[in-house]
Image (spheres, helix red, strand yellow):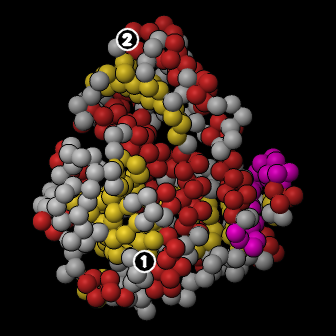
Amino acid sequence: MRILVVGSGSIGVKVAGSLVEEGHDVVLLDHSSLRQAQLDGSIDCQLVTGNATSPSVLTDILRGCGLVVAVTGSDEVNLVVCRLAQLQGVPTRLARLRNPEFTGPRPAVDPKDLGVDAVFSPEGMAVDLVERVIAAPGAVEAASFADGRLSLLGFPVLSGAFVGPLSEVGARLPEGCQVVALKRGAQALIPSGADHLAVGDVAYVLGPSAQAGELTRALAPGRTAARTVVIFGARMMGIELAQRLRRTVRRVVMFSPDPTRAQAAAIILDPLGIEVIEGSVLDLDLLRGAGVEDADYLVTLSDDDENNLMAALLCRQRTRATPILMTQKNQYVEIFELLGFPLVIEPRALATSAILRFLRGGPILALARLHHDDIEVIELSLGADSPLVGRPLGQIRPPVGMRVAAVVDQRSAAVATGRTVLTAGQRVVIVVDSAVGRDVRRWLG
Protein backbone atom coordinates (compact mmCIF):
# COMPACT_ATOMS: atom_id res chain seq x y z
CA MET A 1 0.00 0.00 0.00
CA ARG A 2 1.14 3.54 -0.71
CA ILE A 3 1.26 5.56 2.52
CA LEU A 4 1.99 9.23 3.19
CA VAL A 5 3.55 10.12 6.55
CA VAL A 6 3.60 13.87 7.24
CA GLY A 7 6.18 15.07 9.76
CA SER A 8 9.71 13.69 10.00
CA GLY A 9 10.12 14.12 13.73
CA SER A 10 10.68 11.13 16.00
CA ILE A 11 7.12 9.81 15.61
CA GLY A 12 7.04 10.15 11.83
CA VAL A 13 10.45 8.56 11.29
CA LYS A 14 9.66 5.59 13.55
CA VAL A 15 6.26 5.00 11.94
CA ALA A 16 7.66 5.37 8.41
CA GLY A 17 10.54 3.01 9.15
CA SER A 18 8.23 0.35 10.57
CA LEU A 19 5.89 0.61 7.59
CA VAL A 20 8.82 0.26 5.17
CA GLU A 21 9.95 -2.89 7.00
CA GLU A 22 6.46 -4.31 6.51
CA GLY A 23 6.71 -3.82 2.76
CA HIS A 24 4.71 -0.63 2.20
CA ASP A 25 5.51 2.13 -0.30
CA VAL A 26 6.08 5.10 2.04
CA VAL A 27 6.44 8.82 1.32
CA LEU A 28 7.75 10.98 4.18
CA LEU A 29 6.87 14.68 3.82
CA ASP A 30 8.25 17.53 5.92
CA HIS A 31 8.70 21.27 5.48
CA SER A 32 12.31 21.22 6.74
CA SER A 33 14.92 20.57 4.06
CA LEU A 34 17.58 20.28 6.79
CA ARG A 35 15.68 17.55 8.60
CA GLN A 36 15.06 15.65 5.37
CA ALA A 37 18.74 15.92 4.42
CA GLN A 38 19.71 14.42 7.78
CA LEU A 39 17.44 11.44 7.05
CA ASP A 40 18.68 10.86 3.52
CA GLY A 41 20.19 7.39 3.28
CA SER A 42 19.02 6.31 6.73
CA ILE A 43 15.49 5.31 5.78
CA ASP A 44 14.37 3.45 2.68
CA CYS A 45 11.46 5.62 1.60
CA GLN A 46 10.78 8.64 -0.62
CA LEU A 47 11.63 11.92 1.14
CA VAL A 48 9.73 15.01 -0.01
CA THR A 49 10.26 18.56 1.23
CA GLY A 50 7.28 20.90 1.05
CA ASN A 51 4.33 22.59 2.73
CA ALA A 52 1.94 19.85 3.84
CA THR A 53 -1.04 22.24 3.88
CA SER A 54 -0.62 23.16 0.23
CA PRO A 55 -3.06 21.37 -2.11
CA SER A 56 -0.57 21.72 -4.96
CA VAL A 57 2.06 19.85 -2.92
CA LEU A 58 -0.31 17.11 -1.75
CA THR A 59 -2.26 16.41 -4.94
CA ASP A 60 0.36 14.29 -6.69
CA ILE A 61 1.60 12.62 -3.50
CA LEU A 62 -1.89 11.55 -2.44
CA ARG A 63 -2.71 9.96 -5.77
CA GLY A 64 -3.02 6.24 -5.09
CA CYS A 65 -2.51 6.55 -1.31
CA GLY A 66 -4.48 4.23 0.93
CA LEU A 67 -3.43 5.87 4.18
CA VAL A 68 -2.24 9.23 5.53
CA VAL A 69 -0.51 9.59 8.92
CA ALA A 70 -0.19 13.26 9.93
CA VAL A 71 2.14 13.57 12.95
CA THR A 72 3.68 17.04 12.78
CA GLY A 73 3.87 19.07 15.99
CA SER A 74 0.99 21.30 14.81
CA ASP A 75 -2.64 20.32 15.33
CA GLU A 76 -3.68 22.74 12.61
CA VAL A 77 -1.34 21.24 10.00
CA ASN A 78 -2.40 17.70 10.85
CA LEU A 79 -6.09 18.58 10.59
CA VAL A 80 -5.65 20.34 7.24
CA VAL A 81 -3.67 17.37 5.85
CA CYS A 82 -6.40 14.92 6.86
CA ARG A 83 -9.16 17.10 5.44
CA LEU A 84 -7.35 17.49 2.11
CA ALA A 85 -6.68 13.75 2.04
CA GLN A 86 -10.38 13.09 2.65
CA LEU A 87 -11.32 15.38 -0.23
CA GLN A 88 -8.97 13.42 -2.48
CA GLY A 89 -10.50 10.11 -1.48
CA VAL A 90 -7.79 8.65 0.78
CA PRO A 91 -9.64 5.93 2.73
CA THR A 92 -7.90 6.17 6.12
CA ARG A 93 -6.49 9.25 7.83
CA LEU A 94 -4.72 9.43 11.20
CA ALA A 95 -3.70 12.58 13.08
CA ARG A 96 -1.57 13.46 16.06
CA LEU A 97 -3.50 16.06 18.08
CA ARG A 98 -2.61 17.75 21.36
CA ASN A 99 -5.53 20.07 22.12
CA PRO A 100 -7.90 18.41 24.64
CA GLU A 101 -10.80 20.10 22.84
CA PHE A 102 -10.20 17.48 20.15
CA THR A 103 -8.83 14.60 22.25
CA GLY A 104 -10.98 14.63 25.39
CA PRO A 105 -13.82 12.22 26.15
CA ARG A 106 -16.37 14.88 25.06
CA PRO A 107 -14.56 16.87 22.34
CA ALA A 108 -15.92 20.28 21.39
CA VAL A 109 -15.56 19.22 17.76
CA ASP A 110 -15.57 15.60 16.62
CA PRO A 111 -12.32 15.07 14.66
CA LYS A 112 -14.22 12.74 12.33
CA ASP A 113 -16.13 15.80 11.09
CA LEU A 114 -12.76 17.23 10.05
CA GLY A 115 -11.65 14.15 8.12
CA VAL A 116 -9.75 12.35 10.90
CA ASP A 117 -10.47 8.64 11.40
CA ALA A 118 -8.28 8.15 14.48
CA VAL A 119 -6.63 10.59 16.89
CA PHE A 120 -3.38 10.00 18.77
CA SER A 121 -2.40 12.34 21.59
CA PRO A 122 1.11 11.83 23.03
CA GLU A 123 0.29 14.09 25.95
CA GLY A 124 -3.00 12.34 26.72
CA MET A 125 -1.29 8.95 26.67
CA ALA A 126 1.41 10.23 29.02
CA VAL A 127 -1.22 11.45 31.49
CA ASP A 128 -2.96 8.06 31.31
CA LEU A 129 0.31 6.29 32.10
CA VAL A 130 1.22 8.58 35.02
CA GLU A 131 -2.24 8.09 36.50
CA ARG A 132 -1.93 4.29 36.25
CA VAL A 133 1.54 4.27 37.83
CA ILE A 134 0.49 6.47 40.76
CA ALA A 135 -2.49 4.16 41.31
CA ALA A 136 -0.04 1.25 41.81
CA PRO A 137 2.47 2.41 44.47
CA GLY A 138 5.97 1.14 43.78
CA ALA A 139 5.34 0.29 40.12
CA VAL A 140 7.53 1.83 37.41
CA GLU A 141 5.38 0.80 34.45
CA ALA A 142 1.69 0.05 34.10
CA ALA A 143 -0.66 -1.08 31.34
CA SER A 144 -4.11 -2.63 31.19
CA PHE A 145 -5.67 -5.35 29.08
CA ALA A 146 -9.02 -7.16 28.76
CA ASP A 147 -11.01 -3.93 29.11
CA GLY A 148 -9.22 -3.14 32.37
CA ARG A 149 -9.67 -6.57 33.96
CA LEU A 150 -5.96 -7.44 33.63
CA SER A 151 -3.09 -5.20 34.73
CA LEU A 152 0.56 -5.38 33.74
CA LEU A 153 2.75 -3.79 36.42
CA GLY A 154 6.53 -3.42 36.50
CA PHE A 155 8.07 -3.49 39.99
CA PRO A 156 11.74 -3.00 40.92
CA VAL A 157 12.71 -5.96 43.09
CA LEU A 158 13.81 -4.48 46.40
CA SER A 159 15.27 -5.99 49.52
CA GLY A 160 12.47 -7.71 51.41
CA ALA A 161 10.50 -8.68 48.29
CA PHE A 162 10.17 -12.22 46.94
CA VAL A 163 13.34 -13.50 45.25
CA GLY A 164 14.53 -16.89 44.02
CA PRO A 165 13.46 -19.26 41.22
CA LEU A 166 10.41 -17.95 39.37
CA SER A 167 8.70 -21.29 39.87
CA GLU A 168 8.79 -20.57 43.62
CA VAL A 169 8.15 -16.84 43.37
CA GLY A 170 5.09 -17.45 41.22
CA ALA A 171 3.58 -19.68 43.90
CA ARG A 172 3.86 -16.81 46.42
CA LEU A 173 2.26 -14.17 44.21
CA PRO A 174 -1.46 -13.40 44.48
CA GLU A 175 -3.73 -15.88 42.72
CA GLY A 176 -3.78 -15.45 38.96
CA CYS A 177 -0.58 -13.36 38.81
CA GLN A 178 2.60 -14.34 36.97
CA VAL A 179 5.95 -12.78 36.05
CA VAL A 180 5.88 -12.48 32.24
CA ALA A 181 9.03 -10.42 31.65
CA LEU A 182 12.20 -9.31 33.45
CA LYS A 183 14.54 -6.38 33.09
CA ARG A 184 18.04 -7.12 34.36
CA GLY A 185 20.46 -4.26 33.83
CA ALA A 186 20.31 -3.34 30.16
CA GLN A 187 18.76 -6.69 29.20
CA ALA A 188 15.08 -7.54 28.93
CA LEU A 189 13.96 -11.16 28.72
CA ILE A 190 10.92 -13.42 28.69
CA PRO A 191 11.66 -15.78 31.58
CA SER A 192 10.94 -19.44 32.18
CA GLY A 193 10.26 -21.08 35.53
CA ALA A 194 13.96 -21.92 35.81
CA ASP A 195 15.01 -18.24 35.78
CA HIS A 196 15.71 -16.52 39.10
CA LEU A 197 14.28 -13.25 40.37
CA ALA A 198 16.96 -11.17 42.07
CA VAL A 199 17.20 -7.87 43.93
CA GLY A 200 17.76 -5.12 41.35
CA ASP A 201 15.62 -6.73 38.64
CA VAL A 202 12.41 -5.18 37.37
CA ALA A 203 9.66 -7.81 37.36
CA TYR A 204 6.73 -7.31 34.99
CA VAL A 205 3.71 -9.07 36.47
CA LEU A 206 0.44 -9.74 34.68
CA GLY A 207 -2.62 -10.47 36.76
CA PRO A 208 -6.21 -9.52 37.61
CA SER A 209 -6.59 -5.79 38.23
CA ALA A 210 -8.52 -6.64 41.40
CA GLN A 211 -5.28 -8.12 42.79
CA ALA A 212 -3.19 -4.97 42.21
CA GLY A 213 -3.26 -3.97 45.86
CA GLU A 214 -2.17 -7.39 47.07
CA LEU A 215 0.50 -7.53 44.37
CA THR A 216 1.86 -4.17 45.53
CA ARG A 217 2.12 -5.47 49.09
CA ALA A 218 4.03 -8.51 47.82
CA LEU A 219 6.50 -6.77 45.52
CA ALA A 220 6.66 -3.27 47.02
CA PRO A 221 6.45 -3.88 50.77
CA GLY A 222 5.89 -0.73 52.78
CA ARG A 223 4.46 1.33 49.90
CA THR A 224 1.05 2.86 50.52
CA ALA A 225 -1.46 4.74 48.37
CA ALA A 226 -0.29 8.21 47.33
CA ARG A 227 -1.56 11.07 49.50
CA THR A 228 0.40 14.03 48.10
CA VAL A 229 1.57 14.56 44.50
CA VAL A 230 3.66 17.51 43.28
CA ILE A 231 3.46 18.49 39.61
CA PHE A 232 6.17 20.65 38.06
CA GLY A 233 4.86 22.45 34.98
CA ALA A 234 1.52 24.13 34.23
CA ARG A 235 1.07 23.08 30.64
CA MET A 236 -2.17 21.46 29.44
CA MET A 237 -0.76 18.05 30.36
CA GLY A 238 -0.08 19.10 33.96
CA ILE A 239 -3.51 20.66 34.34
CA GLU A 240 -5.25 17.53 33.03
CA LEU A 241 -3.19 15.29 35.33
CA ALA A 242 -3.96 17.47 38.35
CA GLN A 243 -7.69 17.33 37.63
CA ARG A 244 -7.62 13.52 37.38
CA LEU A 245 -5.48 12.96 40.46
CA ARG A 246 -7.69 15.17 42.61
CA ARG A 247 -10.32 12.42 42.55
CA THR A 248 -8.04 9.91 44.30
CA VAL A 249 -5.17 11.85 45.92
CA ARG A 250 -5.70 13.94 49.05
CA ARG A 251 -3.36 16.79 48.06
CA VAL A 252 -2.13 17.92 44.65
CA VAL A 253 0.33 20.84 44.38
CA MET A 254 1.45 22.40 41.10
CA PHE A 255 4.59 24.55 40.65
CA SER A 256 5.14 26.75 37.60
CA PRO A 257 7.95 29.26 37.13
CA ASP A 258 5.95 30.91 34.31
CA PRO A 259 3.63 33.58 35.83
CA THR A 260 1.22 33.54 32.90
CA ARG A 261 0.83 29.77 32.93
CA ALA A 262 0.57 29.69 36.72
CA GLN A 263 -2.27 32.22 36.69
CA ALA A 264 -4.10 30.40 33.89
CA ALA A 265 -3.75 27.08 35.73
CA ALA A 266 -4.95 28.61 39.00
CA ILE A 267 -8.19 29.78 37.38
CA ILE A 268 -8.98 26.16 36.50
CA LEU A 269 -7.51 24.35 39.50
CA ASP A 270 -8.16 26.62 42.50
CA PRO A 271 -11.90 25.80 42.56
CA LEU A 272 -10.97 22.10 42.80
CA GLY A 273 -8.80 22.66 45.86
CA ILE A 274 -5.54 22.21 43.94
CA GLU A 275 -2.73 24.55 45.00
CA VAL A 276 -0.90 26.37 42.20
CA ILE A 277 2.37 27.97 43.28
CA GLU A 278 4.15 30.49 41.05
CA GLY A 279 7.79 29.46 41.18
CA SER A 280 10.12 26.55 40.57
CA VAL A 281 10.61 23.37 42.59
CA LEU A 282 14.30 24.21 42.24
CA ASP A 283 13.72 26.99 44.80
CA LEU A 284 14.46 25.26 48.11
CA ASP A 285 12.83 27.96 50.24
CA LEU A 286 9.67 27.76 48.14
CA LEU A 287 9.69 23.99 48.35
CA ARG A 288 10.02 24.02 52.13
CA GLY A 289 7.37 26.71 52.45
CA ALA A 290 4.92 24.59 50.48
CA GLY A 291 5.31 21.74 52.97
CA VAL A 292 5.78 19.01 50.36
CA GLU A 293 8.83 17.28 51.87
CA ASP A 294 6.65 14.20 52.51
CA ALA A 295 5.08 14.13 49.04
CA ASP A 296 4.73 10.67 47.53
CA TYR A 297 5.44 11.61 43.90
CA LEU A 298 7.02 14.45 41.94
CA VAL A 299 5.86 14.53 38.31
CA THR A 300 8.08 16.74 36.14
CA LEU A 301 6.10 17.99 33.15
CA SER A 302 7.87 21.22 32.25
CA ASP A 303 8.93 21.74 28.64
CA ASP A 304 12.61 21.83 29.66
CA ASP A 305 14.14 18.35 30.00
CA GLU A 306 17.18 19.64 31.86
CA ASN A 307 15.02 21.45 34.43
CA ASN A 308 12.96 18.29 34.84
CA LEU A 309 16.13 16.35 35.62
CA MET A 310 17.42 18.98 38.05
CA ALA A 311 14.05 19.02 39.83
CA ALA A 312 14.12 15.23 40.16
CA LEU A 313 17.70 15.26 41.52
CA LEU A 314 16.88 17.97 44.04
CA CYS A 315 13.67 16.34 45.25
CA ARG A 316 15.41 12.99 45.60
CA GLN A 317 17.78 14.64 48.08
CA ARG A 318 15.34 16.93 49.91
CA THR A 319 12.01 15.05 49.86
CA ARG A 320 10.74 11.48 50.03
CA ALA A 321 8.93 11.86 46.70
CA THR A 322 9.38 9.29 43.94
CA PRO A 323 10.20 11.25 40.75
CA ILE A 324 8.32 10.59 37.49
CA LEU A 325 10.21 12.34 34.70
CA MET A 326 8.91 13.32 31.31
CA THR A 327 11.25 13.83 28.37
CA GLN A 328 10.72 14.71 24.73
CA LYS A 329 14.10 13.28 23.76
CA ASN A 330 14.44 9.55 23.21
CA GLN A 331 18.17 9.62 23.95
CA TYR A 332 17.47 10.98 27.45
CA VAL A 333 15.37 8.01 28.56
CA GLU A 334 18.31 5.68 29.12
CA ILE A 335 20.43 8.49 30.60
CA PHE A 336 17.76 9.29 33.18
CA GLU A 337 17.43 5.60 34.03
CA LEU A 338 21.21 5.28 34.47
CA LEU A 339 20.99 8.18 36.94
CA GLY A 340 18.62 6.09 39.03
CA PHE A 341 15.23 7.27 37.77
CA PRO A 342 13.27 4.24 36.55
CA LEU A 343 10.04 6.19 35.96
CA VAL A 344 10.76 8.01 32.69
CA ILE A 345 7.97 8.77 30.21
CA GLU A 346 8.45 9.78 26.59
CA PRO A 347 5.05 10.85 25.20
CA ARG A 348 6.10 10.57 21.57
CA ALA A 349 7.17 6.95 22.05
CA LEU A 350 3.75 6.16 23.53
CA ALA A 351 2.03 7.70 20.52
CA THR A 352 4.30 5.85 18.10
CA SER A 353 3.40 2.51 19.68
CA ALA A 354 -0.32 3.32 19.54
CA ILE A 355 -0.15 4.35 15.88
CA LEU A 356 1.71 1.18 14.91
CA ARG A 357 -0.81 -0.93 16.81
CA PHE A 358 -3.65 0.76 14.91
CA LEU A 359 -1.91 0.32 11.57
CA ARG A 360 -1.28 -3.35 12.15
CA GLY A 361 -5.00 -3.65 12.77
CA GLY A 362 -6.51 -7.08 12.37
CA PRO A 363 -6.80 -8.98 15.62
CA ILE A 364 -4.61 -6.73 17.81
CA LEU A 365 -6.72 -5.12 20.55
CA ALA A 366 -4.07 -3.70 22.90
CA LEU A 367 -0.30 -3.44 22.96
CA ALA A 368 2.28 -2.36 25.54
CA ARG A 369 6.01 -1.99 24.86
CA LEU A 370 8.44 -2.61 27.71
CA HIS A 371 12.02 -1.50 28.32
CA HIS A 372 12.82 0.61 25.27
CA ASP A 373 10.52 -1.51 23.07
CA ASP A 374 12.53 -4.71 23.67
CA ILE A 375 9.42 -6.66 24.64
CA GLU A 376 5.82 -6.34 23.44
CA VAL A 377 2.76 -7.48 25.39
CA ILE A 378 -0.13 -7.89 22.96
CA GLU A 379 -3.81 -8.65 23.40
CA LEU A 380 -5.36 -10.18 20.30
CA SER A 381 -8.49 -11.94 19.14
CA LEU A 382 -8.20 -15.49 17.82
CA GLY A 383 -9.63 -16.46 14.47
CA ALA A 384 -10.70 -19.99 13.54
CA ASP A 385 -7.48 -20.54 11.58
CA SER A 386 -5.14 -19.37 14.36
CA PRO A 387 -2.33 -21.86 15.13
CA LEU A 388 -3.14 -21.36 18.83
CA VAL A 389 -6.65 -22.80 18.53
CA GLY A 390 -7.77 -26.36 19.20
CA ARG A 391 -4.88 -27.98 21.08
CA PRO A 392 -3.44 -27.69 24.60
CA LEU A 393 -0.87 -24.88 24.64
CA GLY A 394 1.73 -27.32 25.95
CA GLN A 395 1.54 -29.19 22.64
CA ILE A 396 1.98 -26.09 20.47
CA ARG A 397 5.44 -24.87 19.48
CA PRO A 398 5.27 -21.12 18.83
CA PRO A 399 8.31 -19.19 17.59
CA VAL A 400 11.13 -18.81 20.09
CA GLY A 401 10.61 -15.53 21.91
CA MET A 402 6.83 -15.78 22.27
CA ARG A 403 4.72 -16.83 25.24
CA VAL A 404 0.96 -17.02 25.79
CA ALA A 405 0.36 -15.38 29.17
CA ALA A 406 -3.41 -15.11 29.64
CA VAL A 407 -6.72 -16.04 28.09
CA VAL A 408 -9.71 -13.68 28.09
CA ASP A 409 -13.39 -14.54 27.82
CA GLN A 410 -16.42 -12.27 28.04
CA ARG A 411 -16.67 -12.81 31.80
CA SER A 412 -13.21 -13.91 32.88
CA ALA A 413 -9.50 -13.39 32.40
CA ALA A 414 -7.08 -16.06 33.61
CA VAL A 415 -3.46 -17.16 33.43
CA ALA A 416 -2.80 -19.58 30.55
CA THR A 417 -1.20 -22.94 31.34
CA GLY A 418 0.10 -25.81 29.25
CA ARG A 419 -3.31 -27.49 29.62
CA THR A 420 -5.25 -24.48 28.32
CA VAL A 421 -7.12 -25.14 25.05
CA LEU A 422 -8.03 -21.99 23.16
CA THR A 423 -11.05 -21.56 20.89
CA ALA A 424 -11.89 -19.17 18.06
CA GLY A 425 -13.27 -15.87 19.31
CA GLN A 426 -11.32 -15.90 22.54
CA ARG A 427 -8.76 -13.22 23.29
CA VAL A 428 -5.25 -13.93 24.50
CA VAL A 429 -2.43 -11.87 25.92
CA ILE A 430 0.94 -12.84 24.50
CA VAL A 431 4.45 -11.69 25.39
CA VAL A 432 6.87 -11.30 22.47
CA ASP A 433 10.56 -10.50 22.12
CA SER A 434 10.45 -7.51 19.73
CA ALA A 435 13.42 -8.93 17.82
CA VAL A 436 11.19 -11.75 16.56
CA GLY A 437 8.00 -9.71 16.35
CA ARG A 438 7.70 -9.99 12.58
CA ASP A 439 8.18 -13.79 12.73
CA VAL A 440 5.48 -14.04 15.39
CA ARG A 441 3.01 -11.91 13.41
CA ARG A 442 3.70 -14.04 10.33
CA TRP A 443 3.19 -17.25 12.34
CA LEU A 444 -0.06 -15.97 13.82
CA GLY A 445 -1.29 -15.10 10.34
Q: Which residue is mark 1?
A: 156
Element marked by disc 2:
loop
User: Left of 383 or right of it: where is 303?
Assistant: right
Measured along the vertical axis of the image, is residue 170 above or below residue 146?
below
* Residue found at x 33% / y 71%: 415
Measured along the vertical axis of the image, is residue 252 above or below residue 56?
below
Q: Earlier in the sequence, mark 2 or mark 1?
A: 2
Indicate the quadrant containing the N terminus: top left, top right, bottom left or bottom right: top left
* Residue found at x 64% / y 31%: 110
Q: Which mark is on residue 307? A: none
* Residue found at x 52% / y 40%: 120
User: Left of 440 or right of it: where is 13?
Assistant: right
Measured along the vertical axis of the image, is residue 411 above or below residue 51?
below
Q: Tell me which amino acid carries mark 1.
A: Pro
Span colored in magenta: 248-268
**In the depicted view, which residue is nearer to us: 191 or 198?**
191
Q: Position of residue 355 (x, y in %)?
A: 43, 40
Q: Position of residue 436 (x, y in %)?
A: 20, 52
* Residue found at x 42% / y 88%: 161
Q: Tell me which amino acid carries mark 2.
A: Arg
Indicate the quadrant containing the C terminus: top left, top right, bottom left or bottom right: top left
Is 425 inside the magenta-drawn segment? no
In this orientation, does residue 252 appear?
yes
Is 249 inside the magenta-drawn segment? yes
Label 2, label 1: how far apart the Cα atoms are = 51 Å
Q: Position of residue 341 (x, y in %)?
A: 49, 69
User: Left of 345 or right of it: where is 442?
Assistant: left
Q: Position of residue 288 (x, y in %)?
A: 77, 77
Could you say which quadrant of the image residue 231 lies in? bottom right
Tell us which disc is closer to us: 2 or 1. 2
Q: Which residue is mark 2?
A: 63
**In the depicted view, which residue is nearer to us: 439 or 200?**
439
